[in-house]
Amino acid sequence: MAGPAFRAAAVRVRVPATSANLGPGFDAFGLSLGLYDDVVVRVADSGLHVDIAGEGAETLPRDESHLLVRSLRTAFDLLGGQPRGLEVVCANRIPHGRGLGSSSAAICAGIVAARAVTIGGDSRLDETALLELATEIEGHPDNVAACLLGGFTLAWTEAGAARAIRMDPSESIVPVVFVPGKPVLTETARGLLPRTVPHVDAAANAGRAALLVEALTRRPELLLAATEDRLHQEYRAPAMPESIALVNRLRADGVPAVISGAGPTVLALADNGTADKVALLAGEGWAANRLDLDASGASVLPLTS
């Protein structure tokens, strides 16, 4: 079987930040946010050249160990073969190690770019295969589903394969993220979770997760009750005490707030009338950003836009 042919022109991929869990939807729910990384990939005659600007520019590797490059390589293998060389330019805006899906963004950018630069890539690697591949690389589907599909996503595995559905969140919801200065490793946050939880807590979370679907899509006035969590946030408090304290303080003020993903970023789900006021509530030590909801997910864009 002949190997793939590649486009001579570069491709540009834009991928959004994401917030997973959203309180009770542990390892299942994801929300796509209007904060983006951009990646430009071009097939070259030989070698690998990686250029990085923005987040991670001082620390990320510029060789085959870069997560985006590894994702490119994995996708190219599925698409039929590797190109002779690659040029990769990354403009990173998603904070790293803060629970906003930076690793999922890198993975999704890599596999979408590989498909886009491969002639006939769409037919060789369809949307279902993209999600399965991204999940295989990342290890769980919640962030990658939201990154690929945009909007509000519910992801699960079925017979070992990742699946997801996309829903439109209410347009009245305005995400506000509070990003602390120091990261927390996902492995550290996961390591604090107990192997078992009380049945009453599991039952409570199941009800809140079901309510959250309704609250996020149609009845945002229910978000405070719907974002209550008993499965993971308080267990992770030793790794991010300031984040948990901020969540509790915001919720006491009536603001639906949760730990974003594995933390330590805090996500508040405000509206147009309250978002600016909510952004002022954290105090010193936090970078508060009012964001849009992202509806598109990972996108291939013209180089000039």
Image (spheres, rainbow, N blue to C red):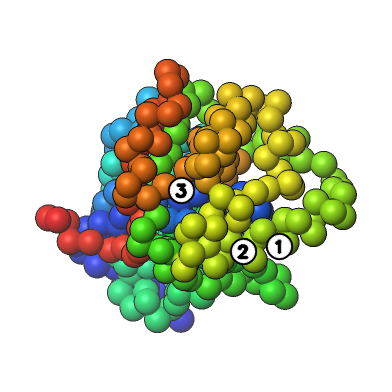
Crowd rating for badge 1 (residues with CA inside 10 Å; few <14, some 14–19, many 20+)? few
Density class for disc 2 (Cα within 10 Å; few <14, some 14-19, many ≥20) is some
What x and y, as percent, mark residue 46? Answer: 30, 50
Q: CA distance from mark 2 to mark 3?
A: 15 Å
Against 253, residue 239 (above or below) is above
Q: Position of residue 19 (x, y in %)?
A: 50, 49
Q: Is residue 141 visible?
A: no
The disc placed on residue 211 is 2
Instruction: Decide if residue 206 is on the left or right side of residue 217.
Output: right
Q: Are marks 2 and 1 in contact (CB under 8 Å)?
A: yes
Q: Residue at x 45, y 27 (%)?
A: 282
Nearer to me, 155 or 60: 155
The span from disc 3 to disc 1 (Cα, nearest Å) is: 19 Å
Tell me which amino acid carries mark 3: Leu
Q: Estimate the spatial distance between the alpha carbons at disc 2 and disc 1, rounded to whole Å.
A: 6 Å
Q: Earlier in the sequence, mark 3 or mark 1?
A: 1
The residue pinned by badge 3 equals 269
Mark 3 surroundings within 10 Å by alpha-carbon count, few (fewer than 14), some (14 through 19), many (20 or more): many
> Residue visible at 60% across and 27% down?
245
- Quadrant where the C terminus lies? bottom left
Horizontal side of residue 125 vs 11, given as left or right: right
Q: Amino acid at mark 1?
A: Gly
Residue 208 is at least partly visible in this image: yes
Q: Earlier in the sequence, mark 2 or mark 3?
A: 2
Could you say which disc has been placed on residue 15 in the image? none
Spot occupied by residue 131 in the image (x, y as percentages of width and height): 52, 67
In the image shown, does 221 or 248 lie closer to the viewer? 221
Q: Residue 34: image x %, image y %? A: 33, 51
Q: Which mark is residue 207?
A: 1
Assign a secondary structure to mark 2. Answer: helix
